[in-house]
Amino acid sequence: MRTSAKGLLLGCFPTGVSPGSWERQQVNVLHERAAELADGDRVVYQDLQGLFLNRDGSVNHTTMSGDDVHLAAPGYEAWGEAALPTIRRMIDGSAE
């Protein structure tokens, strides 16, 4: 029996003080592996790390809290706004 269920797989938030930190490298590996699970139709992967990073790759403390792990209030809003179009496309069944 085929199911019509769909899933949106969002990569984890960036962590680690700098782009070259061990923590950030591990996050990048996780994103690479998560992307491999997506088929673009039933399982859609979305990398939203850019919402939480400055241009130099450091953690943006407007969207991330000072602990470099959790979101700040504006980060939750940005996260939802970025994921919503994909969710709507998945629900409507329209092409991306």
Image (cartoon, rainbow, N blue to C red):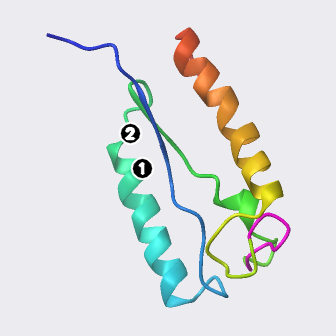
Label 1 amino acid?
Answer: Ala
Pointer 2: what residue?
38
Label 2 amino acid?
Answer: Ala
Query: Of 31 and 4, which appears nearest the observer?
Result: 4
- Please give the name of the residue rendered at 81% of the width and 72% of the height, measured from the top-left corner: 54
Residue stretch in magenta = 58-64
- Please give the name of the residue rendered at 44% of the width and 31% of the height, measured from the top-left corner: 40
Crowd class of label 2 (few under 14; some 14 to 19; many from 20; radius 10 Å):
some
Provide residue 49's location: percent of width, then percent of height.
64, 60
What whole-number distance in Å separates the C-alpha atoms at marks 2 and 1?
6 Å
Provide residue 96's location: percent of width, then percent of height.
59, 23
- Please give the name of the residue rendered at 74% of the width and 73% of the height, measured from the top-left corner: 65
Magenta-highlighted stretch: main secondary structure? loop
Label 2: which secondary element? loop
Provide residue 41's location: percent of width, then percent of height.
42, 24
Residue 88 drawn above or below residue 92 = below
Crowd class of label 1 (few under 14; some 14 to 19; many from 20; radius 10 Å):
some
Q: What is the number of the mark on residue 76?
A: none
Q: Quadrant of residue 91?
A: top right
Query: Of 37 and 1, which appears nearest the observer?
Result: 1
Pointer 1: what residue?
35
Position of 67 with respect to 39 (left or right) is right
Does the stretch in magenta take in 88?
no
Position of 56 with respect to 68 (left or right) is right
Contact flag, marks 2 and 1 (Cβ < 8 Å) = yes
Can residue 94 be seen here? The reply is no
